[in-house]
Amino acid sequence: MCGIVAYLGKKTAQPILIEGLKRLEYRGYDSAGLAMLSGGIIKIKKTKGRINDLEKILDKPIESETIGIGHTRWATHGEPNSVNAHPHLDYTGKIVVVHNGIIENYSTLKTWLQSEGAKFVSDTDTEVISNLIGYFYATGNGAAGQNKFEWAVQRALKEIHGTYGLAILCSDFPDTLIGAKNGSPLILGVGDSEYLLASDAAAIVEHTTQAIYPANNEVVVITAAGFHTKTLDNVTVTETIKKIEFSLEQIELGSFPHHMLKEIFEQPKSLSTCMGGRIDIQNNRIKLGGIASYLRELTRTRRIIFTACGTAFHAGLVGEFLFEHLARIPTETEYASEFRYRNPILEDGTVVIAISQSGETADTLAAVEQAKERGATVLGIVNVVGSSIARTTDAGIYLHAGPEIGVASTKAFTAQVAVLSMLAIELGRRRHISSFHATECMKELAKIPDKISRILQQSDHIKQIAAANIDRNNWLFLGRGFNYPVALEGALKLKEISYIHAEGLPAAEMKHGPIALIVDGMPAVFIATEGPQYDKIMGNIAEVKARGGKIIVVATEGDNNIKKYADHLITVPDAPEIFQPMLTVIPLQLMAYHAAVLRGHDVDKPRNLAKSVTVE
């Protein structure tokens, strides 16, 4: 959940670390800190607050300081304050660490270290790491042919249970930077006589597009002369350098005030890229190369389980409806955070598909590992190339939606639904629907990006609707069929960034209890596009209107009938019901965005949240 960055090279480290932390701040922004190593002296500056607060207390950069580590925190163990901020120095004063993850046995290790004379000053689990490395460094002799610092890191990490992405310095080794990974993201950027460790490529891409992705339980040791990677058991690992797939321009704001708005408006392009080269109408095929060798197994499967969290879970619900409708495969969607703790039935013929933008979501990764242990075929749908879920699953499909920086996911959702739509069409063509039907589906799917462009032109109109209703602190979002998951997603977006309480429901369920919540003027957002359940949802609108609710409707262009029921009307282009979620979600994303801005909130850094939930 936190962001770490480290630099070793010939340039002044401090400005590079600060810029890297700013690019990682979406991962956590409770506190921040730097540690610089110069002349055998570790200098630490850290504070509660954001990177801008850290900059205020930093000394002027020193040209000769060319190695350092930095951290931006999303608090887990210990409240957000300057003492608990990273980096953490060990009790000997020689080892300093930044950490992303959670150490599960920190309490036991802390008690033992204290009995050995180690002193602790923070409430964090991370200080156990620095003190444990420091203890072995101070008391051990290392191994033949291996420096003592490297050995102490390997020795300490063998005792640790939990997740970590680490960057570590030792005052006795002023030209050495060590990184380590287990369950938390870590990438090493390889530049021209310089190296950067970071939680993701956003902090690296300005300096290099060449990177390696260490695997779990691996340690990478970096010096000016190069780097090498080993397991915790000191077995050398040969790494392959890969090209980072996105550019610096893609993570810059450009003319937009916020990343979230930029990413909402990027959706026509991101969907076109996601579907580009995959929809082959001429040959009536969907080409999904990442899972090509598993298509026969998917065609024969008797049951599919989607597992995901948050917005990805809502995309999975849309996928459930798509797979059952087009491919006639029994499908269910499960919260990964629940799936991992129960005793799921994974009989022969079950395929588990994990969905995650980052590919690092801790609960989803744990669900993947559990499903694999039980013998299921496990596929992934992720956005970040080289991420943990992408490497752990048997195969998968990349979204190719480009980097998503805004904490509230937008373009990843539509790309996830697009990928699920393509897969459902292809499986449907192989199992259930006619070639003609499959071709018509492909044609309609290919039209979605242009239709989204038309919806985005209503941004100012949606802002006016938000302005008229942001004084109300309880909203309902209601939809039926394929638009029920969109109602859930709309409510989640409003909650995440505007801090307005909202509830998403199947419209028919409203009268089974939640209708009691409706009071005069309460905003009720209905997704009431034309489709099989149009007449039914019109009845639901009438029920709310009769009780004084403020009716906000997302309807199909040209639907004149619905105007007399709506206090506020937003229209979307006509599309088959199965593809409507990619259209109807756009007004709800804009509604949440404008509501948050009008209420004065930091849209890209909502309170208590971070982009990628890499801790439990």
Image: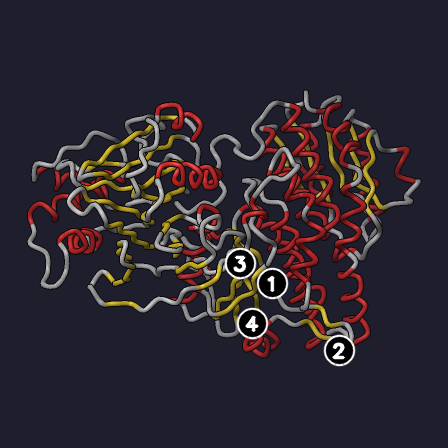
Which residue is found at the position 59% from the left and 53% from the top?
402
The amino acid at mark 1 is Thr
Q: Position of residue 218 (x, y in %)?
A: 29, 59
**Residue bearing the label numbered 2:** 283
Would residue 195 appear left or right of 118 to someone viewing this image? right
Mark 4 to mark 3: distance in Å? 20 Å
Mark 4 to mark 2: distance in Å? 19 Å
Element carrying mark 4: helix
Closer mark to the observer between disc 3 and disc 1: 3
Element carrying mark 3: loop
Mark 2 to mark 3: distance in Å? 29 Å
**Which comes before the other along the chain, label 2 or label 1?**
2
Would residue 41 appear left or right of 403 to someone viewing this image? left
Q: Place residue 399 in its image quadrant.
A: bottom right
Q: Residues within 10 Å of mark 4 (few under 14, many from 20)?
A: some
Q: Position of residue 499 (x, y in %)?
A: 58, 28
Which residue is found at the position 81% from the left and 55% from the top?
575
Closer mark to the observer between disc 4 and disc 2: 2
The amino acid at mark 4 is Ile
Q: Position of residue 4 (x, y in %)?
A: 37, 43
